[in-house]
Amino acid sequence: MALEKLTSYLDEKGIKYVVVRHSKAFTAQEVAASAHIPGKEMVKTVMVKVDDDIKMFVLPSTHDVDFEAIKDTFDAENVELASESEFEDMFPDCEIGAMPPFGNLFDMDTYVAEVLTEDEKIAFNAGTHKEVVKMNYKDFEDLVNPEIVPIAVRAMS
């Protein structure tokens, strides 16, 4: 259902994209490997509790959330990963952990890691752990109008 909602939205806006089906995978790195997508193009949607507000952050799969940077950016006291039970109702058509990075489709703001803006193409979960959508980053930015913030650090290998 989430994939249909997303592709209908992209079709309505005249956006070019590709849907890639792959074997079931859960982490962004597993999805990238399963779908044969470079890790730097694969993005992950991370739900973070900033004080008592749940926010959607989007960053490359090769990076981790920088909680201190989020504290500074939002002048927050407490920043932590949101638990699945805290956000599962916000994405009724999606499998937990497979939400597409389109906060605008779920009535929430979207925050994108500054480093992601360097990518020409991005790929992301399309609401399931078996489907990925690939599209131009610029089209994503035009549709979602995210706030660009410095909230990611390169993951340690």
Image (tube, rainbow, N blue to C red):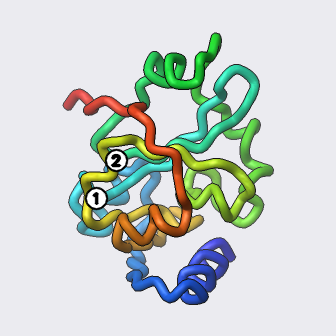
Q: Total number of numbered labels?
A: 2
* Left or right: residue 81 compared with residue 17: right
Q: Are marks 2 and 1 in contact (CB under 8 Å)?
A: yes
Instruction: Looking at the picture, tell me which residue is in the foreground, 53 or 32.
Output: 53
Instruction: Looking at the picture, tell me which residue is in the foreground, 30 or 92.
Output: 92
* Left or right: residue 92 compared with residue 61: right
Q: Amino acid at mark 1?
A: Glu
Q: Looking at the image, which residue is at 73% across and 43% down?
A: 87
Mark 1, other Cα within 10 Å: few <14 / some 14–19 / many ≥20: many
Quadrant for the N terminus in the image: bottom right
Q: Does dot 2 land on a helix, a strand or a loop?
A: strand
Q: Does dot 1 land on a helix, a strand or a loop?
A: loop
Asked if 99 appears above or below 52 in the picture, the reply is: below
Query: Which numbered disc flags the more N-terminal residue, 2 or 1?
Result: 1
Instruction: Looking at the picture, tell me which residue is in the foreground, 37 or 75.
Output: 75
Q: Looking at the image, which residue is at 67% across and 32% down?
A: 83
Q: Looking at the image, which residue is at 68% across and 39% down?
A: 84
Mark 2, other Cα within 10 Å: few <14 / some 14–19 / many ≥20: many
Instruction: Name the mark on residue 60.
Output: 2
Q: Looking at the image, which residue is at 37% across and 72% down?
A: 134
Query: Residue most toward the right?
Result: 89
Report which residue position mark 1 lands on.
Answer: 41
